[in-house]
Image (tube, rainbow, N blue to C red):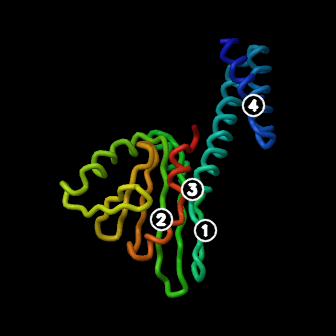
Amino acid sequence: MTRIFAVLMMSSLALPAQADDVSDLMESALKAYEDGDIQYALDELDMARRALLDMKTASLGSYLPEAPEGWTREVSTEMGAGLAMMGGGVGAEATYTDAGGARVKITLMADNPMVMSMSGMIANAAVMGMKTERIQRQKFAVQDKQMMALIANRILVQTEGDPEQTRPLLEAMDFADMANFGL
């Protein structure tokens, strides 16, 4: 058990300066463990894990495109709780609205069991009666006002809205860089 804490502590040293809260929580967990307060150690590790997930979520959110001229973007901060109930992972979501009231929503989910279940549907979209199209070498399944793609077999990109308004937003995203997310 001490070795696990030592590994966690050593890995925290490699985190960027903004991760001081994480390092502090991990140090506190180690101290509590050494003092025999296992529950407090677990609580501190849980808080450190949540802080790391928040950092990973913010990183995923950076792939959401800025709002085009004449549009606004509202980023949702509530995906984490929903993903926790669906097996974990991280997610980011933004809703784009133009002056005329048209709306497009882009949702990103990574490292979630539900994402893997979507892979078969996306791969076999044509068999399931959906259209497919390519955007930046990514295959998107298109049905009505929804588009879906799986990036690097672990990141689901899902949109809701008029595909004609959605495409420019998707074309502004860096799917090649997104494929390396969290690696």
| Circle nearer the N terminus (1, 2) | 1
Indicate the amino acid at tag 1. Answer: Glu
- Residue at 62% x, 56% y: name it: 62
| Circle nearer the N terminus (1, 4) | 4
> Cβ–Cβ below 8 Å for labels 1 and 2?
no
Residue with the mark numbered 4: 14
Nearest to the eye among marks 1 and 3: give it: 1
* Mark 1–mark 3 distance (CA, rounded to whole Å): 19 Å
Q: If the image is split into quadrants, where does the N terminus sit?
A: top right
Residue with the mark numbered 2: 170
The local crowd at label 4, few if under 14, some if 14 to 19, many if 20 or more residues have their Cα within 10 Å, is few
Residue with the mark numbered 3: 78
Indicate the amino acid at tag 3. Answer: Glu
Indicate the amino acid at tag 2. Answer: Leu
* Mark 3–mark 4 distance (CA, rounded to whole Å): 29 Å
- Secondary structure beneath label 3: loop
- Secondary structure beneath label 4: loop
Q: If the image is split into quadrants, where does the C terminus sit?
A: top right
Residue with the mark numbered 1: 66
The local crowd at label 3, few if under 14, some if 14 to 19, many if 20 or more residues have their Cα within 10 Å, is few
| Circle nearer the N terminus (3, 2) | 3
